Image: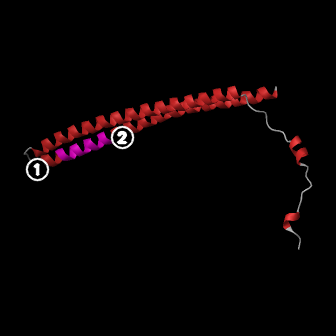
């Protein structure tokens, strides 16, 4: 049985590495500028997203405060004596109005979130397009 470790390839490593070609190194100044632009774009997108989250939180708080005030008014009106059928009709009307308000408010919050995330993604999309153009220009500059 032959020794499995006795195989020795017939390969001249100095010749192999002499023929090995590395791609051209990019201009480090241009690379640093591009990375700086990338970081600025990410920072701007984060700022837009944070401002959007703040706006959503503020509006949500306003909605909660408004809902509590409306609930207190509803409780006061239900506590007043009156005809049972009239009270039931009032409650049904209040429930319908509350449902319609809640769905409108949820839609409003969803629209705020959609708008802020769209703006943040737009900032990143713009930078990505710029970066691809920079890469394209670098590759054409090297060929010339």
Mark 2 crowd level (few <14, some 14–19, many ≥20, 10 Å Cα): some
Give the dominant element type of the magenta stretch: helix, strand or loop. helix
Is residue 129 shown above or below 106? above
Q: Quadrant of the N terminus?
A: bottom right
Q: Disc count in the image?
A: 2
Visual colour scheme: secondary structure
Secondary structure of the residue carrying numbered label 1 = helix
- Residue 95 or residue 86, whichever sits in front: 95
- Is 52 placed left or right of 66 in the picture? right
Q: Quadrant of residue 95?
A: top left
Q: Which residues are magenta?
A: 90-103
Q: Quadrant of residue 37?
A: top right
Residue at image point 38% right, 39% down: 107
Q: Quadrant of the C terminus?
A: top right
Secondary structure of the residue carrying numbered label 2 = helix
- Res 84 label: 1
Residue 116 in the image: state x and y as whole percent: 45, 33
Mark 1 crowd level (few <14, some 14–19, many ≥20, 10 Å Cα): few
Residue 94 located within the stretch drawn in magenta:
yes
Q: Residue furthest left?
A: 81
- Residue 72 or residue 44, whichever sits in front: 44
- Res 106 label: 2
Residue at image point 36% right, 40% down: 106
Residue at image point 21% right, 47% down: 92
């Amino acid at each position: 049985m032959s020794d499995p470790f006795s195989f020795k390839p017939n390969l001249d490593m100095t010749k192999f590495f002499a023929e090995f070609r590395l791609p051209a190194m990019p201009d480090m100044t241009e690379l640093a500028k591009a990375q700086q632009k990338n970081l600025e774009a990410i920072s701007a997108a984060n700022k837009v997203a944070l401002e959007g989250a703040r706006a959503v939180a503020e509006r949500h708080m306003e909605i909660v405060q408004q809902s509590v005030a409306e609930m207190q008014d509803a409780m006061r009106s239900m506590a007043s004596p009156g005809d049972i059928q009239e009270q039931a009709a009032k409650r049904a009307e209040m429930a319908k109005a509350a449902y319609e308000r809640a769905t409108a408010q949820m839609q409003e919050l969803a629209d705020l979130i959609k708008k802020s995330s769209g703006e943040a993604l737009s900032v990143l999309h713009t930078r990505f397009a710029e970066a691809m153009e920079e890469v394209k220009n670098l590759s054409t500059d090297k060929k010339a």
